Image (cartoon, grey):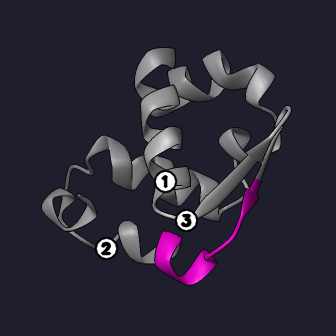
Amino acid sequence: MHRDVRERLAVDLDAGGPALRKLRKQRNAAARLGITKETMSRLLRELKQQGLIAMSGASITILDRARLAGLAREPASALD
């Protein structure tokens, strides 16, 4: 089954993947997820607005791991 880009980012963040480690490596994490750096920035901003993550400097903190993990199992329309 093909995961949409939001699902892939949620899975990566929940697993402590590259997106979580450092925003300065955002281009590498985006490439690993098969998205552009700009798309990744937009998605991170959306997750922040939804209260799932916090961003400070070069780090990301997961605020609601249960909801973030749930995004990987929900259709994209449920994320809006």
Residue found at the far left of this picture: 77
Q: Looking at the image, can residue 36 be seen?
A: no
Q: Position of residue 30 (x, y in %)?
A: 53, 25
The answer to whether residue 13 is left or right of residue 76 is: right
Cα–Cα gap, marks 2 and 1: 20 Å
Q: Position of residue 44 (x, y in %)?
A: 53, 41
Dot label at residue 49? 1
Residue type marked 2: Arg
Residue at image x 47%, y 33%? 33
The residue indicated by pointer 3 is 51
Pointer 2 local density, CA inside 10 Å: few below 14, some 14–19, many at least 20: few
Count of all numbered marks drawn on residues in the image: 3
Quick one: SS at disc 3?
A: loop
Q: Which residues are magenta?
A: 61-68
Cα–Cα gap, marks 3 and 2: 18 Å
Residue found at the far front of this picture: 49
User: In front: mark 2 or mark 1?
Assistant: 1
Quick one: SS at disc 2?
A: loop
The residue indicated by pointer 2 is 73
